[in-house]
Amino acid sequence: MSSNDVSVVLVHGAWADGSSWARVVGPLAAQGVRVVAAPLPLTSFRDDVAAVERALERVSGPVVLVGHAYAGAVIAATRDEKVKALVYVAALAPDEGETVADVFYRTEPHPEAPKLAPDDHGLIYLPENAFAAAFAQDAAAEELAVLAAVQRPISPACITVAVERPLWKDRPAWFLVAERDRMIVHENQRFMAERMGARIRSHDVDHAPLVTAPAAVVDIVREAIAEIVAG
C-alpha cells in the first residue's frame, strides 16, 4: 500500500464551508492523495453525520477522516469501516453521553470570544468582526473577507444532542492543539486530546490553522496517512 491508496475526507466546522480547506487540499492532492471535502448542512447533528457518511461513500480504500472545530464531534459519529484514523484540528471531542455544547462550554471563554445567540430563524451566525478577533486572528484581510462571506450558520440542534460511543475509542487519533485559539481555548483542547489518548501535536496557531497555518495541518494528516500505509 502507498499513500496514493489512502483517501482523506476533510470536514469543516461551524461558520465555514469546504473552501476553508483549500490550502490543505492542494498540497495533499499534489502528492497524489485523493481528497474530498464533505459539505455539512449544519442543520442538525444527525444531518451532519449523514453528510459525512455520503462523502465516505464516494471514496474507496482506507480513509483518514479530518475534522475542524465542531466537526470533531461529527467525524467520531461514523461507523464506516473504511475510516482507519481520525485527525482533530482545534476540534471538539465529546465523549459518550456528552453534547458539543457540554465540551465547548466546559472552560471559561477567551476574552476575545464572541457572544453567540440564535437569530430570528433559530440559526447562530458568527458576528463578522469575530473572524478577525477570534476565529482567525492570523488571517490576512482578504482571507477574513472570504471567511465572513461564505460562513454557514449553525443550528442549536447540532450542539445539544448527546453523542454515542465516539469512534476515537476504537481508532487511532491525532490532535492538533492550537495554542492561541480564542474560540476553543487550548487548555480545553488539550483536556479532550489527552482524554482521547490522541497523538498531540501542539502549534502556536489560531483557531483556523487550515487557513492560516496549513502546513501544520498537512503535516499531521500526512503522519496519519503514513501510519495507515505502514500497517
Image: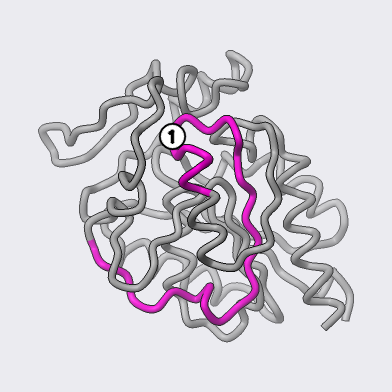
Residue 139 location, x and y as percent?
A: 61, 22
Q: Quadrant of residue 23?
A: top right
Q: Amino acid at mark 1?
A: Met
Density class for disc 1 (Cα within 10 Å; few <14, some 14-19, many ≥20) is many
**Spot occupied by residue 84 in the image (x, y as percentages of width and height):** 66, 78
From which residue to which does the magenta span run? Answer: 161-189
Residue 88 left/right relative to 96: right
Element marked by disc 1: loop
Q: Is residue 88 above or below residue 207?
A: below
Residue drawn 63% across and 67% down? 173
Quadrant where the N terminus sits is bottom right
Please say whether residue 186 is one of the residues in the magenta stretch.
yes
Q: Quadrant of the C terminus?
A: bottom right
Q: Identify the residue shown where x is 26% and y is 67%.
A: 162
| Closest to the observer, 119 or 58 | 119
Residue beneath the point at 66% across and 30% down: 212
In the displayed structure, 231 sits above or below 32; it is below
The residue most toward the left is 120
Picture coordinates of residue 22, whole percent (x, y)? 66, 41
Classify residue 60 by image quadrant: bottom right
Coloration mode = one colour
Which quadrant of the figure has residue 125?
top left
Looking at the picture, how far across and down is residue 160, in whole percent? 22, 57
Residue 184 in magenta stretch: yes
Residue pictured at 79% horizontal, 53% vertical: 28
Q: Nearer the viewer, residue 157 or 148?
A: 157
Residue ID for mark 1: 183
Q: Left or right: where does residue 178 sit relative to residue 150? A: right
Q: Considering depth in this image, is 91 or 155 the residue closer to the camera?
A: 91
